[in-house]
Image: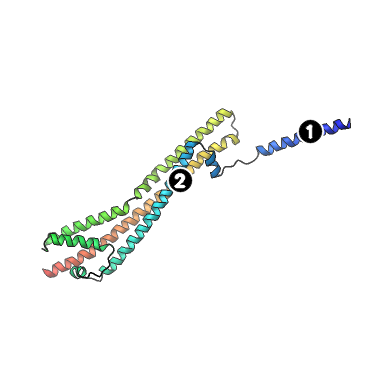
Amino acid sequence: MLYRIVFFTLCILFSQIGFANEVVNAQLPIDLSPQSLYQNAHVIVKAVVILLLLCSIITWAIFLLKLYQLFIGIKAIKKDRVILSNYNSFDKLTANKDLNFKVANLFINEMNQEIIHSQSYFDEDIKARISYRLERQIKQLTMRMKQGISILATIGSVSPFIGLFGTVWGIMNSFIGIAQTRTTDLYAVAPGIAEALFATALGLVAAIPAVVIYNIFVRVIQHYSEQLNSITALLQLALRRDISLKN
């Protein structure tokens, strides 16, 4: 009789331990880390995540490259402007071959070519022709500096919709999971919802920096163009002074 009581007591004890383990396992937190969400995501959502990460990498690569180009370009313009401010005559400026210009040489060459084509005949129309040549050169340099930033505008406008596509796909998979398991338990639907929101977050992470960086570069490139205009203004001022003295 005593053995039976001990046996039934052990059985009840082991059954209670097993039930407790099931309760603990059911209450374990779900792993919703970004790595886990990506690994457990649908192949379509994985493709969306990879595409958004690629867009983010492209954004920051363009940012670093253009930042370096603009820094070097504006710095060179400032050095050239300091040198040009010390010369009042275009003839004296071109006669000095030791000047180390970074940007102004392009404009000086354009002006010299027009003077040669005009056979050194200085009339009122030559000023307009030289201005046209310099404006064209400024536009070319500005367009060259703008190359690549249009990609930022594309990424900024498209990335939220790519993330939204991943969101819709993840929520769709959640509803499919509910239909298959016939349960609305949070443990069953949480991974799919988290996967969907993860795609949305990545879309914003890719889009917001792209838009901000694009707007910054537009303003900085406008400043770069204005600095180029300041150099051409100094060159034209020196040339017009020579024309007035010759006449």
Amino acid type of the residue tagged 1 in the rendering: Ile
| Kind of element beneath mark 1 | helix
Position of residue 241 measured from the top left corner of the image (x, y, whole percent) = 17, 68
Q: Which residue is mark 2?
A: 53
| Kind of element beneath mark 2 | helix
Residue 67 in view (yes/no):
yes
Amino acid type of the residue tagged 2 in the rendering: Leu
Q: Which residue is mark 1?
A: 12
Give the residue drawn at x 60%, y 36%. Answer: 187
Give the residue drawn at x 19%, y 61%. Answer: 111
For this view, does 5 lie left or right of residue 69? right
Give the residue drawn at x 48%, y 38%. Answer: 45
Residue 221 image-quadrant placement:
bottom left
Q: CA distance from mark 1 to mark 2?
A: 54 Å
Q: Is residue 3 above or below residue 74?
A: above
Position of residue 229 measured from the top left corner of the image (x, y, whole percent) = 26, 60
Farthest right residue?
1
Position of residue 149 measured from the top left corner of the image (x, y, whole percent) = 35, 50
Front residue (pair 237, 122): 122
Position of residue 204 measured from the top left corner of the image (x, y, whole percent) = 45, 45
Which numbered dot is residue 111? none
**Quarter holding the C terminus?**
bottom left
